[in-house]
Amino acid sequence: MQTELTLFSVAVLTPLAGAVVAGLGGRFMGDTLAKLVTIACMAVAALCSVGALCAAWLGGFPHAAVPLAQWVHAGGFDATWTLRFDTLSVTMTAMVLVVSLLVHCYSIGYMSHESMPTYRFFSYLSLFTFAMLMLVSSNDLIQLFFGWEGVGLASYLLIGYWYDRPAATAAAIKAFVVNRVADLFFIVGIGLIYVLFHSVQYDTIFAAVPAVLDTPYTLCGVSFRMLEVICFLLFVGAMGKSAQLFLHTWLPDAMEGPTPVSALIHAATMVTAGVFLMARMSPLLEFAPGTRTFVILIGATTCFFAATVGMVQPDIKRTIAYSTCSQLGYMFAAVGVGAYQAAVFHLTTHAFFKALLFLAAGSVIHAMHDEQNMFRMGGLWKKLPVTYVVMWLGSLALAGVYPFAGYWSKDAILNALWASDASYSHYAWAMGSITAFLTAFYSWRLLFLVFHGKPHDEHARDHAHESPAVMTVPLLVLSIGAVVAGVALAPFYIGAHQSAFWNGAIVNAPANHIMEAFEHVPALIALLPSLAGLAGIALAFVLYVSAPHVPATLARSFGPIYRFLLNKWYFDELYDRIFVRPYAALARVLWKGADEGVVEGLPLDIVRATRDGALQAVRLQSGSIAIYAFTMLAGLVVLLTVALCG
C-alpha cells in the first residue's frame, strides 16, 4: 500500500516542480532546457500515476489518504493538505497526466514557429496540470476549490497566451468572468455544506448525509430541503466550468488560444471537472431528486443545442469545441439519472478521442499556415496522410461507431436514459439520439471539407506537409486510446466488475438500480444511436461529396434558421443586451457621476472654495487707516447695541 501512495504523491506534486523551474528559470536556463525540464517532470509524473493505478488495480483499489501539511487552522475550522487515494482520484490522475504528457510533447512541434521564447507557455501547461491534479486528488472541498480556481487561472493565462491579439485577450477575460459567476454559486454551496455538516471533509460529509436529509432551508419565507439547495449550487458551479447551456459562451471563444491548450484544457481535463465534481458528490446527489431533474434538462438540452450550432460553424476548432459542449451534455444527463459510472466512463474515453481531434486539427492548421476556416481548405488527405487517418479514427469514436471508444460510453449513457424512470429521462434520450445523428453529420462534414473535394487554394494545398514526428507520435498514441479504451475499460467502469472496481468511490443509493437496468433495454433502442450515427455520415457524404452545391442552396433557402444556428442561437447578443450594455451604462454613470463628480470633484470644490475665500480675505487687508477706523467704529456700535438691548 505504501508503494502506490508514494507513487501517487510523486505523480501529483511533480508537475509543480516543472512549472516553477520553467517559469522562474526559463529566462536564464534557455528555452530548450525549460521545455526538457517540464516534459521530464511530466514523464516522471505520468509513469508514477500509471504505476499507482496498476498497483491499486492489483490491490483492489483501497481507500487511503496521504496528509502532506497543515493548511488552514482558524478557530474551530481545520483543513489539512491531504491527497485522497481511491478509484476515482487515481484513474483521473492517470488520465490527466497521460494526456498532458502527450500535449506537452506535441507542443514542441506546434509552437516551434513562435518568434518569442515559449518557456512561459510550457510553464503554464505544467501549472494547469498541477492545479487539475489538486482538484481530482482533493480530500475536502477547500482543496478542491483551490484546484478549481487554479485551473481557471491557468486557463486564463493559456487562452490569452498571445496577449498581442485583442481577440485572445478578450476571450481570456470572458472565460474568467463567466466562470467567476458560476464559482460564486459553488462557494456559497461549500459554505452551506459547512453550516449543515460542520465539515468540508468528504468522508465526514458522506457519513452524515442520512442524518440531515430533511433539514430545511428557508429563503424569503419559502422552505426547501437544504440538501437540494446545496446540490443545486454545486451543479451551477459545474455548469460554468463544464460549459453547459447558459454558461457555455466562453468555451467557443477560448479557441483563440493555441491548439494544444484546446486539447488539454477545453477537451480532456478542465471542462470535465464539473462531471468529476458531480461524481465525487454522488452520495449527496442521490438524495436530491429535484436537482437531478434539473441536471437532466440542462445536460440533454446542451447536447442538442451545441450539436445544432456545430453543424454550421466554418472554423475547424470551434466545430470541435461545440462537440465538446455536446458530449459534456451527455455526461451530465447520465449524472441526472444516477449513472455516474457511465458519465465518468464517457469522460475518460472522450478525453482520448477529443484530445486526438483537437491535436489533429492543430496539425491541419500547422500545415495550412494558421488557416482555420474549413471552407478555405480541401483536398488535403494525400498531403497529410497520418493526420487524415487519425482524424478518421477520432471521428469514428466521437460518432459512436462500433467498436470505437465512443460507442461503449455514449451508448451506455443513452441506454441508461431510456431505462431510467426519472423525470425527463426519455426527453434526454430523444435529445441524445438526435444529437448522435447530428454529431456524426458535423464530424464528417469537417472531414470532407478539410480532406476531400477541390482545394480552395491550390498554392496552400501544394505547400502543405505532414507534421513532424514530435506531433504525429502523440496523435498515434491518442488514436490507440480512441480505438481500444472503450472495449478495455467497459467491464470495469460500467460492466460486471464495476462495483468492485469503484469500491465506494462512486455511490448509488439502495433504490438506484440504473447500472443493472441499462443492460436490459430493447435491442432496437440499443441499436438506434448507431443507426443514427451511420445516417449522419451518409448525409454528410451526400451533401459535401456527392452534391457539394446543396449546402449553399439550403443555407439560402432557410436563411433565418441558418443565421440563427451560425450565430449560436444569439446567446452572445442576448447577454450583451441584458448584462453587458446595462452594466457598461451603469459603470459610465458611476465613473462620470460618482468617481469624477464626487470622489474626485469634492476635494477640488473644497480647494476652490478655500482659494476663493482666501482671495476675498486678502481684499479686506487694504492698508487704509480710515477703513480700519470705520470698521472699529462699526464694531463698537454693534457691541453697544447688543449690550443696551440685550
Image: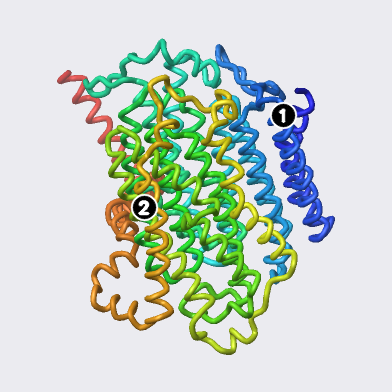
Residue 626 percent across, percent down from the top left: 33, 46
Query: From the viewer's perspective, is 272 left or right of 553?
Result: right
Q: Which amino acid does label 1 sit on?
A: Leu
Q: Quadrant of residue 144?
A: top right
Q: Which amino acid does label 2 sit on?
A: Leu
Q: Is mark 1 on a helix, strand or loop?
A: helix
Residue found farthest to the front: 523
Q: Nearer the viewer, mark 1 or mark 2?
A: 2
Q: What element carries label 2?
A: helix
Q: Which mark is residue 171?
A: none
Q: Which of 221 and 465 is in front in this view?
A: 465
C-alpha span from label 1 to label 2? 37 Å
Mark 1 or mark 2, earlier in chain: 1
Asked whether residue 521 is in view, the answer is yes
Residue identifier under label 2: 528
Q: Which residue is drawn at 56% across and 55% down?
A: 353
Identify whether 618 is placed above or below 107. Answer: above
Q: In which quarter of the image is residue 367?
A: bottom right
Residue 96 percent across, percent down from the top left: 63, 44
Q: Residue at x 63, y 72 (%)?
A: 366
Query: From the viewer's perspective, is 506 left or right of 86?
Result: left
